[in-house]
Amino acid sequence: MSLLTQEHELARKTAREFAEKYVDPIVRKMDRENYYPRETIRDAGELGILTPTVPAEYGGGGGDLRTAVVVLEELGRISGGFSLLVEALGILFADAVNKHASKRQKEEILPKIASGEKIGAFALSEPCCGSDAAAIQTAAVRRGGEWVINGHKMWITNGHYADYYLVAARTGPREARHKAITVFLLKRSNCVETSQIEVMGVRGTGTAEVKFNNCAASDDDIVGEVNGGWKVIVDTLNVGRTAISGVTVGIARGAFEEALKWARNRELFDRKLIEFQNTQFELAEMYASIETARTLAYYAAYLYDINSPGFLIMSHVAKLQTARIAVDVTRRAVQIEGGFGYSKESKAEMFYRDAKILEIGEGTNEVMKYVIYKLIEKGQ
Ligand SMILES: Cc1cc2nc3c(=O)[nH]c(=O)nc-3n(C[C@H](O)[C@H](O)[C@H](O)COP(=O)(O)OP(=O)(O)OC[C@H]3O[C@@H](n4cnc5c(N)ncnc54)[C@H](O)[C@@H]3O)c2cc1C
């Protein structure tokens, strides 16, 4: 049985052509200058690959989760950064809005996001709390018939350039943890202050600190229910963890292709590097790992697409294993390239730095293991 249909392969072709034509020329600029590719995001919007799962009526790609994984894989093969920013925009923001926001919110915002005209960001993590997200301190307080939001978010992808934020805020006592969190959809205004962060990899993604200073919101700006934000967050992250596995597979493939090219050209000891059996074994190991990672990512997405209860644990398994594989494969790619692999000229070097975020963002490896074990205990 194939986990992918012809439609998925069509989406792959579109994303691959787009990545090679539009993302490849800017990938080094993104990495070197932390350059945020605003125009290329608009180009991706025109092709419907910015929001692969948003319905066509809102201008999205109208695909399922497998479509998103395949698109992100193809983008990641060329640029981990571009793929990650599309994942954060198209899944963590747009897919969440599509699933949890009101019709009015969707009609107002999704077409602008899908076309790339506006940028959206998912703002959960804070300086205090990433893994322990139920302890967030950003607060929304009721004052004179409206909500007033104050708080400090951290590490927000696209955050420096966003026009809209999905903001998780505390709407009850800290002791109530996840039971007193509400998600708001905020439009950027003067009350939002951002500063870009210099990150190690996935550069050019507009990763930022975002401060909300007395931001006013109405009941209409709430996504889901008051004190029901945790459901929105968890549902979004479950889907995100599978989607980001597509980014991961792409990064590993990109590094593999670089290493293969290098090994075929590099001459030493009067032979090509590729002729040494160790090199062949390394490439075979890398290939086998990538195929394992892809299968896991596609399978997790397939389980989601058929509404299987097995999705939940598999989403976490896929995130954990694909991230480890990407770090391992990119490390091996650098090794095959030797000194060149350690230089800024090498794309494998960039992929190696990009890969590391996958063991941290959207839940660290340790958090994945925590959730997997909880689900094992529950008999899933
Ligand atoms: C480039 C980048 C982009 C990001 N994009 C976004 C975004 O768009 N939106 C957003 O909301 N967040 C985003 N994040 C934040 C990311 O999700 C968090 O960094 C991540 O969840 C880890 O949280 P933390 O940094 O607070 O680390 P901590 O939670 O402090 O973790 C530190 C270490 O402790 C370990 N640890 C934590 N809990 C346990 C435990 N129970 N048992 C054992 N070990 C544990 C962790 O695994 C980790 O190794 C991004 C981060 C980065 C770096």
Image (spheres, rainbow, N blue to C red):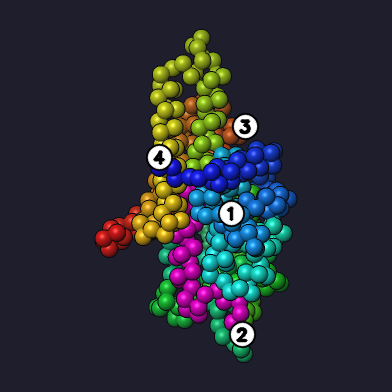
Instruction: Specify which label sits upstream in the sequence, 2 or 4.
Output: 2
Q: CA distance from mark 3 to mark 1?
A: 32 Å
- The residue indicated by pointer 4 is 292
Q: Is residue 228 left or right of residue 46?
A: left
Residue range corresponding to the magenta coloring: 219-246
Toward which corner of the image does residue 160 lie, by quadrant?
A: bottom right
Which of labels 1 and 4 is toward the front?
1
Residue 1 percent across, percent down from the top left:
40, 42
Which of labels 2 and 4 is toward the front?
4
- The residue indicated by pointer 2 is 146
Q: Which mark is residue 52?
A: 1
The residue under the point 49% across, 73% down is: 229
The residue under the point 61% across, 44% down is: 15
Please state which of residues 50 and 32 is positioned toward the viewer in this rendering. 50
Which of labels 3 and 2 is toward the front?
2
- The residue indicated by pointer 3 is 345
Q: CA distance from mark 2 to mark 1?
A: 34 Å
Q: Tell me the chief SS of the magenta region.
A: helix
Is label 3 in a helix, a strand or a loop?
loop
| Amino acid of disc 4 | Thr
The residue under the point 42% across, 59% down is: 307
**Residue 229 on the magenta span:** yes
Instruction: Specify which label sits upstream in the sequence, 3 or 1.
Output: 1
> Are the residues tagged 2 and 4 within 8 Å (C-beta)?
no
Is label 1 within 8 A of ligand 1 (CB to nearest ligand atom)?
no
| Amino acid of disc 3 | Glu
